[in-house]
Amino acid sequence: MSSPSRVRAKWTAIAGVPLLFLAIAALQVRIDAQTRSEAQEEEEMLLRSGKAIKSLSLGYDSLLADIYWTRVVQYYGERVGKDTATFGLLWPLLDVTTTLDPKLMVAYRFGAIFLSEPGTVGANRPDLAVALIKRGIAANPNQWRLNGDLGFLYYWTLKDYPSAAQAYLDGSKVPGAAPWLKMMAARVAEKGGSLETSRMIWSELYDSTQDPSIRHRALEMLRGLKTVEDEKSLDDLAGQYRRRFQRYPASTQDLRDAGLIPGIPVDVDGFPYVFGPDGKSHLDPQSTVVIPKDLATQPTARN
């Protein structure tokens, strides 16, 4: 290319930078309008190609990535918890963000949570969450926490225990990795989806983060796990009681009177467990403990 041509190309690119920022600003205004449907938003998502935006950024990659990450958080926050919520733009926004700045760890770690959560609290796309974390690992091979996140996704969301064990094991080999990764790899490989393993993973998640929303979620799951574990034990005892007395216990008092338990077991809120006519234990209606669906449907919950 001749010298005048190179100059023209350079100034054309430079002129494109303010236009790029103006386009992003216009996109922000349009997406922030609350009355449009998801389909309309998708039509207005003009800047979806991270590679195209990166080629125009002229060194502003990190700044643009921060802008897109802010939009991810806003987009997710506007929808989370709403019955009619959809998250169709979540992956494109995260794709652009991490293409612009492959080192932006928060986008991988929190973006994977946003993508994997089910129902009204996320996109229910654990496959995309896995793809995002794997992209992060490839770009940041020394960040062992990403391997831990991948292990968690495989273990808790996908119930793929061999892949979870491998992810934890790979993370344990990263220089400076936390010792619990190797322990978790062994535990998952040996025990699979046991309640004990789940409790270890959620406890580690609770202890290793300062984010209040994640700590709240982890604490909720730990409370639910304790309840499921208690109910499993009580159901087993109810079976023993029935074999002895040809009927199910009407209450935990019956179990104590039969010498099967030393006292009256209570949940983490302090309320005694109750029995139904089928001999299955459950929470007192006054209890505030919530057993999330992913615990209630866990295969090991009552086996």
Image (cartoon, rainbow, N blue to C red):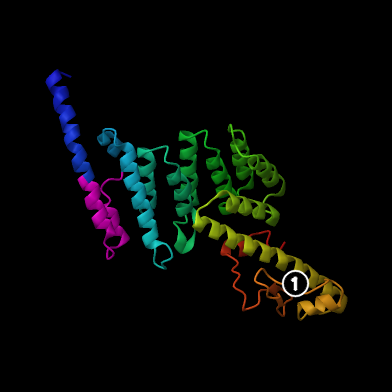
**What is the total number of numbered labels drawn onto the structure image?**
1
Q: Residue at x 48, y 34 (%)?
A: 138
In the picture, the quarter occupied by the C terminus is bottom right
In the rendered view, does 5 fall on the left or right side of 58?
left
In the picture, the quarter occupied by the N terminus is top left
Q: Is residue 138 above or below residue 257?
A: above
Magenta residue check for 26: yes
Q: Is residue 29 visible?
A: yes
Residue 80 on image: x %, y %: 42, 62
Q: Residue at x 72, y 66 (%)?
A: 230
The image quadrant of residue 103 is: top left
- The type of residue carrying mark 1 is Pro
Q: Is residue 271 above or below residue 91?
A: below
In the rendered view, does 196 fall on the left or right side of 70?
right
Residue 300 on image: x %, y %: 68, 59
Magenta stretch, main secondary structure, is helix
Local packing at callout 1 (Cα closer than 10 Å; few below 14, some 14-19, many 20+) is some
Give the residue at the far front of this rendering. 210
**Residue segment shown in magenta:** 22-48
Magenta residue check for 235: no
Q: Is residue 133 above or below residue 122?
A: above
Q: Which residue is mark 1?
A: 265
